[in-house]
Image (spheres, rainbow, N blue to C red):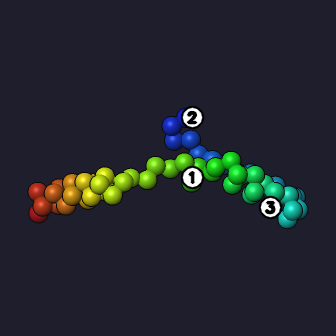
Amino acid sequence: MWQGMKSVMVFDPKDSQVETDRKWREWMEHKSSVGDKYVPTAAETRKYLNELENRKQRYA
């Protein structure tokens, strides 16, 4: 898959509510980009926050 690729859903204003609902279901079943995002672990988050804090102290 391409780096930074975004998932796009296209709605046609002429679609009925049934068709719009079908498109939503299909999109959700195929794992939208929201489900594909990386979530850092607790250790990675702590390391990142510590680095931010260290930078603030250096420049204070």
**Looking at the picture, which amino acid does disc 1 mark?**
Gly
**Looking at the picture, which amino acid does disc 2 mark?**
Met
The percent coordinates of residue 37 (x first, y second) are: 50, 50
Q: Secondary structure at mark 3?
A: helix
Report the side of 26 relative to 41 (left or right).
right
The percent coordinates of residue 13 (x first, y second) are: 83, 59
Q: Residue at x 81, y 57 (%)?
A: 22
Q: Secondary structure at mark 1?
A: helix
Q: Earlier in the sequence, mark 2 or mark 1?
A: 2
Instruction: Report which residue position mark 1 lands on.
Output: 35
Q: CA distance from mark 2 to mark 1?
A: 14 Å
**Looking at the picture, which amino acid does disc 3 mark?**
Asp
- Quadrant for the N terminus, please: top right
Location of residue 5 (image quadrant):
top right
How crowded pointer 2 is (Cα within 10 Å; few <14, some 14-19, many 20+) is rated as few
Instruction: Report which residue position mark 3 lands on.
Output: 21
Q: CA distance from mark 2 to mark 3?
A: 27 Å
Instruction: Report which residue position mark 2 lands on.
Output: 1
Q: Is residue 49 visible?
A: yes
Q: Residue at x 51, y 41 (%)?
A: 4
The percent coordinates of residue 56 (x first, y second) are: 17, 60
